[in-house]
Image: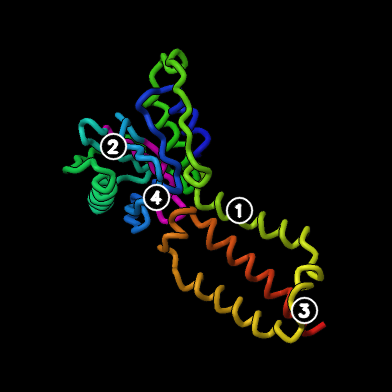
Amino acid sequence: MNSICDILSKDRPGVVHINCQALTKILDGSKRAKSHYFLKNNILERATEVFGVYLENGNHWSFFHCNVDRRCITYFNSLGETEWQCQAIAQHWSAFAASRGVKGEWDLKTTKHNLQTDSVSCGIHTLAVGKKDVPPNVLQQPRKAKTKVTIFSTLTEGEAEDLAKGFGMALTKHVPKDKLLSGIPEEDIPATLRTIEQMKLNVQNLGPESELDLATHRFGPTAVDFFFSFLEDCMKKTQHP
């Protein structure tokens, strides 16, 4: 879904696509969405329109679009839009926008549409609505210059976690465990192990809203956990060959 939406927004100055993972956190009202570290680039700063797909309850796609200048939200749900859904989406988007300097009330509208008649076609309905928003001259729009961004601001949390897991697997595969402890006297290993276990626990106790977690889109805590677990494993095997 993200790839298709990226294509729909390509070469359209002022039109910004928010990836599904980020938009879902915003519209669910996640505390993380209002953090300074969430979506490090202020997507509303130069945007005239913002859109994306919203994964509701982890199993249903819906479509979100907003006109930033008009403070107007359009919400499409192929199963039908309820009043409480609309209110929650408007409230959560308004809170996110305010955290990015775009304050004020937002109007939310829905449009008449056919409802899906099965339990699996929400994605097709959602993309059909999104495609209607693409102007016929989209391919004639000039290409936008790429902006320099950090690696973590371009990765979703899932992608950042996968990167950290790859780091952990590479560590296990390429670092010889026997040489890792060659500089530590055997009698010092128990104390070193206790220190590592405490450091690992300290990072875990920071929680999912810590600065390390938010600033790295979950890469930091995941990579640290792999690293400390690797050291623990090395030392425990030394103690119990």
Residue under numbered circle 1: 162
Question: Which element type, helix, strand or loop, lies under badge 1?
Answer: helix
Question: Which element type, helix, strand or loop, lies under badge 3?
Answer: helix
| Looking at the image, residue 45 lies above or below residue 145 | below
Residue under numbered circle 4: 38
Residue under numbered circle 3: 237
Q: Disc 4 or 3, which lies upstream in sequence? A: 4
Marks 2, 1: nearer the viewer:
1
Q: Disc 1 or 4, which lies upstream in sequence? A: 4
Going by the numbered disc 4, the residue's amino acid type is: Phe
Magenta extent: 51-67
Q: Disc 3 or 2, which lies upstream in sequence? A: 2
Which quadrant of the figure has residue 226? bottom right
Going by the numbered disc 2, the residue's amino acid type is: Thr
Instruction: Determine if the magenta segment contains residue 54.
Output: yes
Which quadrant of the figure has residue 109? top left
Marks 1, 4: nearer the viewer:
4
Crowding at label 4, few (<14), some or many (≥20) Cα neighbours within 10 Å?
some
